Image (tube, rainbow, N blue to C red):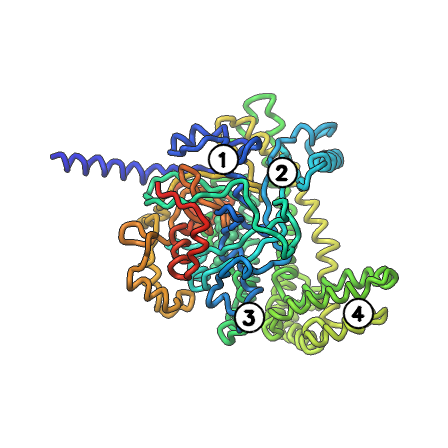
């Protein structure tokens, strides 16, 4: 009897759980977190708002850093030890790798602090405080779009904020300029590389599994912040010492279960929850498919090259991962938005908005804003299309373009440098950076990217018409292909930008005459023929379009806050520090499918040996698994590898700590599931899940797999 009753209760709980996700939309500003404290506590949190964010004493925020300007990282020891994702440290890992020291393939662990490797240019930034400065920024402005006054106020306020400190200040617009916050920052300049697992752990599953659940990636790498003897940021020096943090995160070393409270603290990059229906339609039907196609072209060439040669594999691994990442996300986004009929949802929302605006006289200023936005997008979307394609071609297309752009400063300022006697120094610097460039450059790969992308770019932007007026010679025609091929042959055989010797020799003998020589170099002239119009026409037109959209969005969003005060509002992500919370939770994204909330080492072994190199393992993994050598890191008989949470995250949240109810580190955020990638536009609590690598797996890889227990010993493990 009793057990039947219990089963019945459990069943009810299960049904209730699968119907009601506790997922919370929104990326909250830490300085305003007190408003959510009671809701977070109701969901299991034991912390107070001031444990999470405080300016009067140390708090969790002091352990959260923006890593290298893009990702998030967290401090986990009193000696400045820093964790982030493997894919966030990938550029550094790769730059320390060579055929002799293949850290990508074998991993790397500094045996002691003197083995830790420096990374010129890498920074880690801590937020000192966040202040609402909306009133001060708008002081004296005739409207919220009075950019001249706003910019002057921002400049003044930033300058005042850093007087007498070693900090930096930045003021950012939130909600399309309805609000402004000042961020005071401490930027550390000496961040050293401590360790990484091999790719077969850190990138296990590769692009096959990227953006996909179930997942088994040990996506972490280890760094350490060094500071001057006064514990303040300092440029690299052998005399620097490990940084002593104000706060570091204890490790959540306990069993976990579905329903546990989770919170993600980090620097999400960009969300666009407010875009209007016509814009979303443009993204789904036109812009994304074209960008996806441009990347299809490059990836086909790069993948082929990487398969053929180990050197090319090492040279292109970071670049390939970078191109493939957004490419795959976009494919998932389009699918998700279509499935959810997002455009129709937007249309419904816009209708309700307009009706509300017409319901009270004081709201009439909102009545036409949606129509205006949609009309503007219809009229000018071609500008954004051209801009997006230019971004693809010039930034992700043929790579020699980067060297051409790098020449611009020398060409423009030649006379000045020659006069100041700075010429030799400038040229030396260019040579050093070119060495780095050519280390990872294969001109045959670049040539084929050039051919495919140039054709597609001239097609999409209709610039082929500048080459031939005759439609019968359009891009589809063989004549055009041969034209592009001929140009490519010439550029890659003779241009100074496609060969290290030619380039270095050109720099070594650089003189006034060299500038004339450039104008006879087809690699150079081809680039500028199209880049000039992109820079001088497309980019300014795009900026004007953006400003007009922004001004309307400001009113549109203000209307949402004013007319729908009971809805939960949150400002779109903008690379500032945010908090999002939910719970450890699986999902049922489509009919008939149910994802469990965690994966284990058994799953790694099951994916191995299936013929796909993305799932290759080194023998050690198989041996440790066979011996079930999990040390103290297992839960029951299993070693958890990853889990999912219902936390609203986006790009930039990579490396973010996922924290338990006590603020202890449960794992590192590194991805979202395929079905959730559309959450940048539309969050759906039933399907949106972030993917986390369990900290216990991270520690197992350090301690047992890699024999780097000294790092685990630096941390504080919380067993209850
Ligand atoms: N999708 C994750 C993010 O957006 C991970 C990317 C790195 N992994 C990869 N296989 N490319 O950054
Ligand atoms: N991998 C992403 C990053 O680099 C996080 C995944 C996401 O977009 O949610 O930030």
**Residue extending farthest left:** 1
Q: Secondary structure at mark 2?
A: strand
**Residue 501 horizontal side relative to residue 622, left or right:** right
Mark 1 touches mark 3? (CB < 8 Å): no
Q: Are discs 1 and 2 less than 8 Å apart at CB? A: no
Q: Which mark is residue 519?
A: 4
Q: Is mark 2 within 8 Å of ligand 2?
A: no
Which of discs 4 and 1 lies nearer the camera? The answer is 1
How busy is the neighbourhood of tag 3: few (under 14 within 10 Å), some, or many (20 plus)?
Answer: some
- Residue drawn 65% across the image and 58% down it: 390
Vertical position of residue 140 compared to residue 107: above or below: above
Badge 3 or badge 4: first in the primary sequence: 3
The label nearer to you, 1 versus 2, is: 1
Decide which of tag 2 and tag 3 comes sooner along the chain.
3
**Residue 210 to residue 136: above or below:** below
Tell me how far mark 3 sits from mark 4, CA to CA: 36 Å
Which image quadrant for residue 197? Answer: bottom left
Quarter that holds the C terminus: top left
- Residue at label 3? 98
Which residue is at the front of the view, 182 or 348?
Answer: 182
Give me the C-alpha separation between circle 1 and circle 3.
Answer: 42 Å
Q: Choose the circle earlier in sequence order: 1 or 3.
A: 1
Q: Residue at x 74, y 59 (%)?
A: 532
How far is mark 4 from mark 1, CA to CA? 58 Å
Q: Secondary structure at mark 4?
A: loop
Classify mark 1: helix, strand or loop.
Answer: helix
Crowding at dot 2, Cα within 10 Å, few <14 / some 14-19 / many 20+, comes out as many
Q: Which residue is mark 1?
A: 52
Q: According to the image, label 2 marks what residue?
A: 183
């Amino acid at each position: 009897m009793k057990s039947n009753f219990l089963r019945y209760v459990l069943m009810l709980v299960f049904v209730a759980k699968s119907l009601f996700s506790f997922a919370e939309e929104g990326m909250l500003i830490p300085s305003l977190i007190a408003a959510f404290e009671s809701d977070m506590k109701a969901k299991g949190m034991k912390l107070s708002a001031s444990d999470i964010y405080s300016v009067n004493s140390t708090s969790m925020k002091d352990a959260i850093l923006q890593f290298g300007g893009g990702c998030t990282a967290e401090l986990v020891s009193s000696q400045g030890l820093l964790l982030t994702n493997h894919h966030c440290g990938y550029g550094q890992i790769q730059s320390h790798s060579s055929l002799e020291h293949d850290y990508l393939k074998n991993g790397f662990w500094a045996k002691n602090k003197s083995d830790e490797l420096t990374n010129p240019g890498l920074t880690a930034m801590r937020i000192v405080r966040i202040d609402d400065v909306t009133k001060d920024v708008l002081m004296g402005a005739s409207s919220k779009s009075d950019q001249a006054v706003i910019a002057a106020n921002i400049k003044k306020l930033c300058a005042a904020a850093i007087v007498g400190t070693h900090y930096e200040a930045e003021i950012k617009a939130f909600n399309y300029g309805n609000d402004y916050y000042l961020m005071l920052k401490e930027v550390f300049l000496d961040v050293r590389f401590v360790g990484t697992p091999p790719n077969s752990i850190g990138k296990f599953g590769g692009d096959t599994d990227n953006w996909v659940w179930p997942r088994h990636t040990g996506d972490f790498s280890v760094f350490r912040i060094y500071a001057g003897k006064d514990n303040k940021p300092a440029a690299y020096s052998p005399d620097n010492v490990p940084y002593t943090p104000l706060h570091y995160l204890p490790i959540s070393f306990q069993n976990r279960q579905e329903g546990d409270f989770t919170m993600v603290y980090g620097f999400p990059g960009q969300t666009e929850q407010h875009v209007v229906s016509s814009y979303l339609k443009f993204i789904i039907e036109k812009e994304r498919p074209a960008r996806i196609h441009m990347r299809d072209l490059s990836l086909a060439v790069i993948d082929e090259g990487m398969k053929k040669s180990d050197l090319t594999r090492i040279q292109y691994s970071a670049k390939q991962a970078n191109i493939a990442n957004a490419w795959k996300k976009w494919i998932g986004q389009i699918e998700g938005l279509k499935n959810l009929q997002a455009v129709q949802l937007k249309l419904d929302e816009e209708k309700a908005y307009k009706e509300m605006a017409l319901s009270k006289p004081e709201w009439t200023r909102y009545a036409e804003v949606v129509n205006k936005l949609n009309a503007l997008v219809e009229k000018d979307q071609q500008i954004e299309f051209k801009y997006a394609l230019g971004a693809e071609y010039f930034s992700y297309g043929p790579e020699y373009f980067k060297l051409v752009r790098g020449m611009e400063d020398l060409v423009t300022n030649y006379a000045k440098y020659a006069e100041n006697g700075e010429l030799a120094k400038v040229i030396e610097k260019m040579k050093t950076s070119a060495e780095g460039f050519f280390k990872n450059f294969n001109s045959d790969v670049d040539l084929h990217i050039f051919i495919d992308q140039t054709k597609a770019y001239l097609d999409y932007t209709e610039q082929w018409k500048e080459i031939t007026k005759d439609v019968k010679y359009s891009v589809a025609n063989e004549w055009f292909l041969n034209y592009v091929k001929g140009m490519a042959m010439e550029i890659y055989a003779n241009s100074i930008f496609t060969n290290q010797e030619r380039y270095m020799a050109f720099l070594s003998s650089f003189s006034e005459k060299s500038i004339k020589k450039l104008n006879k170099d087809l690699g150079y002239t081809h680039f500028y023929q199209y880049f000039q119009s992109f820079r001088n026409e497309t980019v300014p037109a795009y900026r004007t379009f953006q400003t007009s959209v922004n001004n309307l969005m400001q009113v549109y969003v203000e209307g949402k806050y004013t007319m729908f005060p009971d809805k939960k509002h949150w400002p779109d992500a903008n690379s500032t520090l945010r908090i999002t919370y939910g719970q450890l939770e699986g999902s049922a994204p489509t009919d008939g499918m149910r994802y469990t909330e965690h994966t284990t080492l058994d799953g790694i072994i099951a994916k191995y040996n299936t013929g796909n190199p993305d799932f290759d393992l080194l023998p050690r993994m198989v041996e440790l698994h066979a011996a079930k050598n999990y040390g103290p890191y297992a839960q029951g008989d299993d070693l958890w590898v990853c889990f999912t949470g219902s936390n609203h995250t986006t790009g930039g949240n990579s490396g973010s700590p996922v924290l338990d109810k006590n603020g202890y580190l449960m794992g590192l955020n590194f991805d979202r599931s395929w079905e959730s990638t559309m959450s940048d536009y539309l969050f759906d609590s039933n399907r949106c899940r972030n993917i986390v690598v369990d900290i216990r797996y991270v520690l197992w890889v350090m301690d047992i797999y890699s024999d780097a227990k000294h790092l685990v010993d630096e941390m504080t493990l919380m067993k209850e």
